[in-house]
Image (cartoon, rainbow, N blue to C red):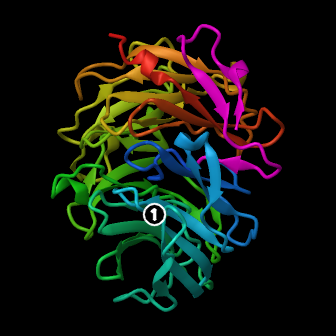
Amino acid sequence: MKLRNDLLAPDGAQGLEVVQLTTGPLPSSHLYMEAQVFTPDSKRFVLHESATAHGSSKDDPRHRYLVCDLDDNCALRPITDETGVTAPSISPDGRHLYYFVDQTEVNGGKLTLKRVGLDGTDRRTLLVVDSVLPGTAYRPSCIYPLSTIRSDGKRLALSCFLGDGRREEQPWGLMVFDLVRLSVELILEGPSWCNVHPQYSRSTDEAKRRDILVQENHGNSCDAAGEIRRLVGGNGADIHVIKDDGTDFGTMPWGRDGNEQCQGHQCWRGKTDWAITSTMTKEPAECQLIESKAVTEAGHLGAASPGGIRNDLSRKVDAPCFYHFATDAAGHWLVTDTGKTDHGGRLYIARFHRAGRDALSSWTCVAHPRSSWGPDVHIHPCLSPDGTKAFFNSDESGHLQAYMVRGLEALQGQP
């Protein structure tokens, strides 16, 4: 690690520090904002090297996951060494890392689910998928780089391509792995599920924890090998919620109204059943943060869905231009980057108040990441579960590295 207070915002709060966590020759990155890669005590988390901000190549032998121990001077220790590792999730109790080894090919190969203690011991192979998924004619391939684990640690979801390699515009799907029975079920399939971003609710409520936030891309196009030729067409993406058995399909009242489009970044507000998305609007020309709850699906109407509650969290900011964001576990604080490219983007912290009613407040710029904003070097900020540390990516050193802002306790006394 290296102290990098030159990246602090000059007018930010006192007591903050920026630390460059990775300094090696390989490009290194935090996982995507919604990835469940922290222990619940906020003392350890997983990041990776030989990777971009959007993932890695399954054929890269240098790609591996590292455990960062914040209590041990941010020491980095490898926890995987297999080629093809992808889609990690830390168990809710912080004891284990679940991950996959992707050796799939379109309509062939195999996908292996593994588990290892966070100290690197007791590595086990739990399940191998090397034939069609139960009850289907599909074999998974083009494995999505993000998995998501249920708050009781009993289910894990992962998306994939389901094509046969011969025909174009074949389906994509969402698999749910039963971590107790060691089985897998396909709960969602179709040509519009190419970029699902699955996110289990963080709630511990018996019913709510079964909810998975999913992204649908209407009008996307792919070839027979699962290569995406067009990610979003027409009015763009819409966001849904589905139970992990494939029932109770609902919708978030965002986008698809001719003026507002979802950017494709969304997350739960902590452990609540409220969720947040970033938008792009034509009038006014802004990128807003909108908070809502799921409503009954009524025909992919997006923002016009009956009964939808929409709370513009960014309405007290002049000309908001927010892209990527995340919250702490309690849903009290948000971190976000801004699309304004001065200083290579900026990193802001803001405070939540009443869900569904109040705007974010206490906006504080804490860092100037100096990112080039190249296609694979997005800032992608996130927060530790306790909200005291923020994390971001930047290539300001010449290639992609992972950074941390610590000392956010200094902001928690603000009104």
Residue that carries the numbered disc 1 in the rendered image:
193
Q: Nearer the viewer, residue 141 or 389?
A: 389
Is 366 positioned to the left or the right of 299 in the image?
A: right
Name the image quarter holding residue 42.
Answer: top left
**What quarter of the picture does the C terminus occupy?**
top left
Q: In the picture shown, does residue 322 fall above or below 67?
A: above
Q: Nearer the viewer, residue 182 or 95?
A: 95
Q: Nearer the viewer, residue 371 or 258?
A: 371
Q: In the picture shown, does residue 58 fall above or below 277?
A: below
- Residues rendered magenta in the picture: 1-30
Name the image quarter holding residue 269.
Answer: top left
Residue at (15, 58) in percent of width and height: 206
In the rendered structure, does residue 23 fall within the stretch colored magenta?
A: yes
Look at the magenta stretch and give its main secondary structure.
loop
Residue at (58, 75) in percent of width and height: 101
Residue extending furthest top? 11
Residue at (71, 35) in percent of width and height: 373
Residue 359: x and y in percent read 32, 19
In the rendered structure, does residue 338 fall within the stretch colored magenta?
A: no
Q: Nearer the viewer, residue 292 or 90?
A: 90
Residue 413: x and y in percent read 35, 13
Q: Residues within 10 Å of mark 1 (few under 14, many from 20)?
A: many
Residue 375: x and y in percent read 71, 44
Q: Is residue 258 visible?
A: no
Q: Amino acid at mark 1?
A: Trp
Count of marks, rendered view: 1
Name the image quarter holding residue 7.
Answer: top right
Is 195 positioned to the left or the right of 62 in the image?
A: left
Q: Is residue 83 visible?
A: yes
Residue at (60, 81) in percent of width and height: 104
Residue 191: x and y in percent read 47, 68
Disc 1 secondary structure class: loop
